[in-house]
């Protein structure tokens, strides 16, 4: 595990964008796993800026998003389809036919989950998966519980998650109750995972995820088993990590 702590959000965003751009430079046909939520917005802004400056191209890339709400029209401003178009896809040269998200309005959701996993396999698997973390330790929409599902599947969202995401809707009642998400197996198959977290409100869960026991009660703790995990944190999100975690677990990890 490589933990990097950044003095500012801007630095973190820059480093994360650099990771993605570095990969695209050596592998223009890279397959990227993308995330939504507030955390990656600065990374996407940075990618757009660098694309406009001619520093990066997504022309040959393929992307797979982690998740999508069930039953929210694709053109609803809070659907993850709309989020991705607004915050990244509409501003870069990624061919729309290679920008994939689960279809939360599919007539047969189970078939949609199988289709999504097959598509990821056909693309050769994910090279770099960008991940945020929910306050309860969810990754994608894999919620804590007695068991986790490996492949893409339909989930009931935890009330805590719906409340956290209510800030994007007019009220919590409008937040869908279900979502399609890549499973933890799908996520862990990515060759490299970049986990990003910002803010003091994430400090406790970051500590649990990286230093606590590996348990389905904290899905992000399974990331500890991944051989290529890069953790990018701002100082606030890193504030509860032990010095040992920051030092020993992080060859190359540092505060920048
Ligand atoms: C959402 C998304 C996750 C995201 C998480 C944290 O519900 N499904 O992919 O990582 O919650 O969101 P934020 O970055 O806004 O804190």
Image: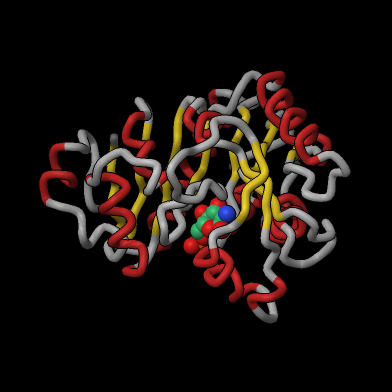
Which quarter of the figure has residue 46? bottom right
Nearer the observer, 225 or 35: 225
Give how far across and how far down residue 70 sits, in percent.
75, 54
Give me the residue at 76% from left, 36% from top.
110
**Residue positioned most to the right:** 107
Looking at the image, which residue sits at the far left? 244
Above or below: residue 223 compared with residue 118: below
Left or right: residue 152 versus residue 192 is right
Q: Disc count in the image?
A: 0
Where is the N terminus found, in terms of image quarters? top left
Query: Residue 192 at what x, y percent from top left?
Result: 45, 30
In the rendered image, the vertical position of residue 219 relative to residue 112, given as above or below: below
Location of residue 250 in the rendering, given as x and y in whole percent from the top left corner: 21, 38
> Would you say 28 lies left or right of 23 here?
right
The image quarter in which residue 237 lies: bottom left
Q: Residue at x 34, y 30 (%)?
A: 225
Q: Residue at x 63, y 76 (%)?
A: 172
Frontmost residue, 216 versus 198: 216
- Let me know if residue 94 appears in the view: yes
User: Image point 45% across, 50% down: which residue?
Assistant: 144
Quarter of the view holding residue 58: top right
The answer to whether residue 44 of the structure is visible from this angle is no
Q: Is residue 46 above or below residue 199?
A: above
Q: Residue furthest front?
A: 146
Colour scheme shown: secondary structure
Q: Position of residue 221 (x, y in %)?
A: 34, 42
């Amino acid at each position: 595990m490589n933990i990097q702590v950044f003095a500012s959000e801007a630095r973190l965003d820059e480093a994360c964008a650099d990771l993605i751009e570095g990969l695209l430079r050596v592998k223009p046909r890279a397959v990227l796993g993308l995330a939504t939520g507030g955390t990656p917005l600065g990374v996407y802004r940075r990618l757009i800026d660098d694309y406009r400056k001619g520093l990066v191209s997504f022309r040959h890339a393929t992307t797979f998003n982690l998740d999508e709400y069930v039953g929210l029209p694709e053109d609803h401003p809070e659907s993850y389809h709309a989020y991705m178009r607004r915050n990244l896809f509409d501003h870069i040269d990624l061919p729309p036919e290679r920008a994939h998200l689960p279809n939360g309005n599919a007539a047969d959701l189970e078939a949609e989950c199988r289709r999504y996993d097959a598509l990821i396999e056909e693309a050769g698997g994910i090279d770099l998966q960008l991940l945020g973390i929910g306050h309860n330790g969810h990754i994608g929409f894999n919620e804590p519980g007695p068991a986790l599902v490996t492949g893409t599947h339909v989930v009931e969202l935890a009330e805590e998650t719906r409340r956290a995401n209510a800030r994007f809707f007019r009220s919590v009642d409008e937040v869908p109750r279900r979502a399609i998400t890549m499973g933890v197996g799908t996520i862990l198959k990515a060759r490299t995972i970049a986990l990003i977290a910002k803010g003091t409100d994430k400090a406790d869960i970051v500590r649990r995820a990286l230093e606590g026991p590996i348990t389905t009660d904290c899905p992000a703790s399974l990331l500890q088993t991944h051989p290529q995990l890069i953790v990018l944190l701002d100082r606030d999100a890193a504030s509860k990590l032990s010095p040992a975690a920051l030092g020993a677990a992080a060859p190359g990890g540092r505060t920048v």
